Image (tube, grey):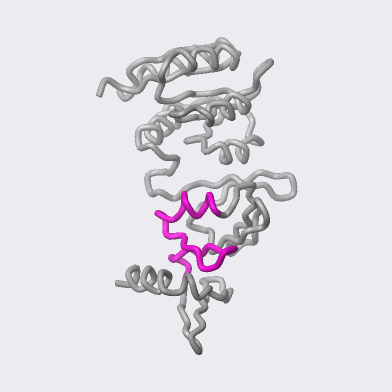
């Protein structure tokens, strides 16, 4: 492997040059292209194939979020890493399935972690405990996926339940089921996912199945999902 081919997009020349320099020092990066606007970045991406885009968010004209939205429609979209001084766009970045969200000023070790996530092909940290940005009362905070006990569908949104409370995420339950099933999240009802790690008890009563979770919540399991849940739960206990 000759190394990653990456594109850096930032309208501020000092930030652009620094990020390009730091990436070029990484042995896993083979070539670094640069653009000083999202519009120029889009033109470049239509002509060139790259493995990842390191993208500022607030830029004149086309924003980084808008460029990322266009990239999701590419047949083979590059990995997206947002590099920004603004925390408040983390939820939007998560919805666009960004591999990482790096805050300025950029540290070399933090950028190296972002490159690692691109190489691994997912946004999970080394322990695969995904960091999920959520909004509550106008404040963005990070919830670790391992803290999530169960997930409830609310229309096109999903409500994440943790021991500390619940958080609304602008992502449909079906998407979370697909992306989080490798991490042990199982559908028990058309509107519910549970984390197997937080299932304290599996109960059968008169042919009806229910689960008691680590926070004491009890949830019913649909007949359709009962067999699969029991098999996965017993397999995990072995």
158 relative to 19 in the view: left or right:
right
Work out which residue is located at the far left of the displayed protein and give it.
1
- The N terminus lies in which quarter of the figure? top left
Work out which residue is located at the far right of the displayed protein and give it.
137
Residue 214 in the image: x percent, y percent? Answer: 51, 71
From the viewer's perspective, is residue 113 above or below residue 36? below
From the viewer's perspective, is residue 99 above or below residue 6? below
- The C terminus lies in which quarter of the figure? bottom left
Task: Check if residue 184 falls in the magenta segment.
Answer: yes
From the viewer's perspective, is residue 164 above or below residue 175? below
Give me the residue at 59% from left, 63% from top: 191
From the viewer's perspective, is residue 61 above or below residue 69? above
In-front residue for pair 101/232:
232
Residue 67 in the image: x percent, y percent? Answer: 59, 24
In-front residue for pair 127/47:
47
- Image-quadrant location for residue 114: top left
Task: Check if residue 111 falls in the magenta segment.
Answer: no
Give me the residue at 45% from left, 27% from top: 78
Magenta segment boundaries in residue numbering = 174-199
In-front residue for pair 112/223:
223
Residue 51 in the image: x percent, y percent? Answer: 40, 25
Residue 92 in the image: x percent, y percent? Answer: 62, 37
């Amino acid at each position: 492997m000759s190394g990653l081919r990456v594109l850096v997009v930032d309208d501020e020349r000092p930030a652009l040059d620094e990020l390009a320099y730091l990436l070029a020092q990484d042995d896993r990066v083979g070539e670094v292209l640069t653009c000083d606007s999202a519009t120029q970045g889009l033109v470049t991406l239509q002509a060139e194939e790259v493995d990842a885009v390191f993208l500022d968010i607030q830029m004149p004209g086309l924003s980084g979020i808008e460029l990322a939205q266009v990239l999701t429609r590419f047949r083979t979209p590059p990995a997206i890493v947002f590099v920004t001084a603004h925390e408040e766009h983390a939820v939007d970045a998560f919805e666009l399935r960004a591999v990482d969200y790096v805050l300025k000023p950029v540290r070399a070790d933090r950028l190296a972690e972002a490159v690692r996530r691109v190489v691994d092909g997912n946004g999970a940290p080394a322990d695969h405990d995904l960091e999920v940005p959520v909004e509550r009362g106008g404040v963005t905070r990070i919830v670790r996926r391992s803290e999530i006990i169960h997930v409830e569908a609310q229309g096109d949104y999903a409500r994440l339940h943790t021991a500390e409370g619940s958080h609304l995420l602008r992502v449909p339950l079906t998407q979370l089921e697909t992306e989080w099933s490798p991490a042990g999240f199982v559908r028990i009802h058309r509107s519910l996912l549970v984390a197997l790690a937080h299932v304290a008890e599996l109960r059968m009563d008169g042919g009806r199945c229910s689960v008691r979770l680590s926070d004491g919540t009890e949830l019913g399991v649909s007949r359709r999902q009962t067999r699969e849940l029991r098999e996965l739960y017993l397999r995990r206990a072995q």
